[in-house]
Amino acid sequence: MSDNDDFLEMFFVECDELLDNLSTGLREMEEPGHEIETVHSVFRAVHSMKGAAAAFGLSDLVTFAHRFETVLDMLRSNKLVADPPVMAVLHRASDVLTDLVAAARQSEAGDQSRMQELLSELDGLIGADAEEEEENFDFVPLALDLGPIDIADQATAFDITFAPDADLYRSGNDAVALLHALGQLGDATVEADTDAVPPLSEWSANQPRLRWRITLTTEATETEIKEIFEFVLDCCTLEVTRSAIDACPLPDSETTEVAPASTDDAPEPLAASETEKGHPATTVAGAQVNAPSANATIRVSLDRVDKLMNMIGELVIKESMLNQVVETAGFTENPDVYTALEGIRQLAGDIQESVMSIRAQPLKLVFQRMHRILREAADATGKQVRLEMLGEATEVDKTMIERLVDPLTHMIRNSVDHGLEDAVTRQRRGKPQQGTITLSAAHRSGRVLIEVADDGGGIDRTRVRQIAEERGLVSPDATLSPSEIDALLFMPGFSSKSEVSDLSGRGVGLDVVRREIMALGGRVMIQSQEGEGTSFSITLPLTLAVLEGMLIQIHDQTMVLPITAVQETLRPTGASLHGVGKNGRLLSNRGELIPIVDVACTFGLRRDMAPLEEGVLIVVETDSHRRAALHVDAIFDQRQVVIKSLEENYGRVPGVSAATILGDGNIALIIDPEEIVQSSVSEHHRSSIAYAANG
Amino acid sequence: MSHNAIGKNDVVAFKLADQDFCIDINLVREIRGWSPTTALPHAPSYVKGVINLRGSVVTVVDLSERLGFGPTELSPRHVVIIAWHEGRVVGLLADLVSDIVTIDQSTMQPVPDIASDPSREFITGMITFDDGRILRKIDLAQLLPAPEMVDG
């Protein structure tokens, strides 16, 4: 039973990939001048799923996939043109198929009415051919029927020659499995042709020399026979001819019979023939291992990679401990010790980078799902929307990929629902009727930037302000800058459409998006231009595991500041410092006035601000391009630190993103520059924007 | 492992300001000596900070402060009881661990109304012994800061 479960799990993993191929393929089909191979690949994806689903007895999936496949086959043979209405049906069918797979995974029945609806839509496309295809469909359960097959009157005999190329084995196909499959169609006599097998001295393990001649008596048509070889057609030589003598020849002593029921004891032809010639059978395995493969991949469970990542985290900590020990022992002067330590440090860095690259996955995996979300959102609102994607090859950590799906889904829906105007308004404003939503990703200074931008009307700030006041989120007499008003959208309980819409007004607001992104160590920001559109940007750390940081002293504590935020460090001098009021302090740096934040005070570690002449100023720039000078007591070092969650056992601490373990085994807090700068600003405003420190 | 009869279970007993307290042994993971913590900004006064417990970050709660006895004057002789509660690991700072006691659930009495002492809300019951000793059983759920309380 558990074996079966394993297979089932593998099937679902494969389905995910096939569904991905399917949706990619369908989109490519919409582009002008696509290649016929695209249609083939879409067909193959659906066909493979149907085949595998049949093996697991997932009848809904099989029925649906079959009908889907029929339509695709018509496209393939040019009986149907892929015009927009057809493509729309295909997209919907692909969505239903995705749902059916998801339902099967949960062992649920799935949405039957939606499936029936789509089935009839597909039938509409199939049209007159439907009945003929219906008959054809009956062969599917036959694939599962292991019982002996009656040789009916109309059985025909075929002569089949099958000569696999090296590529067939390289791509993981098994000639024996194909022969077995043939055997299931009817009565098959298989004869191995060993003529081409050279003497042992000339034997090359990489070059298959075996060919098979099969005589098959079956009710199946030639097409059905060829279908078995569908996936290996380009890496074998196959000839199927109707036998001249329409009879089933008796197997002679030199042939191997592959009968439907005797699958288990049929000898492995390649190995058998080798033994005949005196070769050890093990060369087969050797040949496949040695076969050069351009893109060899393995599937590894995420657990193992995570474990590796954790161990590397420990390695980084141990390495810094070692450093400290060496330093205390006074060995640092010794150049050999120094070189050895440096070597270890470098190696640890390299290992860590390699593991991170194992975990890295392109954002395409999330972005792709957004097509469907957009389609459904567009349907629900009756707006015409186009999705443009840029930089989907940008890689981020695998865990992040999974956790980005919900926030992005919500943001896309939000952009369609609230961001874009309806077609009439757009026309009046001289914009194309079809709105565009751009989803883009890029690496920027050690972080990943994802943007969801629309070309809609922009944020109506007066309206946002009014709603926020109605809901009591902000007091009527507060002075708010445009960006502060935009930030109101992220407040819990804010929903900007007066009537709750079916689509994005489900009581889940942008505040949830913000919270989810923050949980990933990321941040969300809005830029909006009236009449031109709104853009949400998310910045995320590259990994959730390590960070390059600057070790600084704050009062009596060592803390870590992410190096990506640091712009410059300087020792303050009297001339560049200015006071503003009682507590405000500014640094004038190259003609720019930058607010000074006393970190120890903001964290409540010290009551009074330290005199500026002592300590160091670190100029940081936050993700929202805000600049501030952090006043700290001293700077120690710069190093890689392992990120440890504080939230797991405690909770969120304002101004702190996480914790890490230092070389001496103590814990140091990692400062969140954005929050610490913001909290010092809101100290003045108290405008209840964004978050308020509870200190 | 001794198999206790129904209605009996083991507790870890510890002392705080000369009073005896206990928590369910199933919640205790280990007991270690006090080591300096890293203070957390904006944390409630009874949260001493965090320590490194073999690579994970664990919050240490000063029980004495939490129960209203005032902050513990720290020395290396103090102990931290590492306990586990609803998926979170927490360190409880105590004066010393005295014993592991098997208690009979039936000897557990509800807490009498003793005015509005802060410790009352953290104690689920009292166990009396023949020698007149009283063990106060602590409710971890009440003791720990709720995650949303800490959240800004």
Image (cartoon, rainbow, N blue to C red):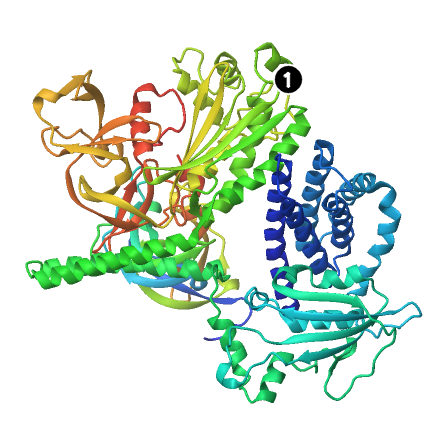
The three-letter amino acid code for the residue at tag 1 is Ala
For the C terminus of chain A, give its image quadrant.
top left
Residue at left offset 28%, top offset 38% = A564
Q: In terms of depth relative to the viewer, which is nearer, A682 or B136? A: A682
Image coordinates for residue B21, horizontal then vertical, percent? 37, 57
Q: Work out whether A3 lies above or below A685.
A: below
Is residue B136 visible in this depiction of the protein?
A: no
Image coordinates for residue A82, horizontal then vertical, percent? 71, 37
Residue density around tag 1, few if under 14, some if 14–19, many if 20 or more, within 10 Å: some
Q: Work out whether A615 lies above or below B25.
A: above
Q: In terms of depth relative to the viewer, which is nearer, A553 or B70? A: A553
Q: Look at the numbered disc 1 and give the secondary structure of its residue.
A: helix
Q: Work out whether A582 lies above or below A354.
A: above
Which residue in the rendered view is the most extreme toward the right?
A153
Q: Is residue A68 left or right of residue A18?
A: right
Image coordinates for residue A50, horizontal then vertical, percent? 72, 55
Image coordinates for residue A454, horizontal then vertical, percent? 52, 24
Q: Within the image, what quadrant is residue A273 found in?
A: bottom right
Q: Label 1 is found on which chain of the structure?
A: A
Is residue A557 visible in this depiction of the protein?
A: yes
Q: Disc 1 designates what residue?
A: A423
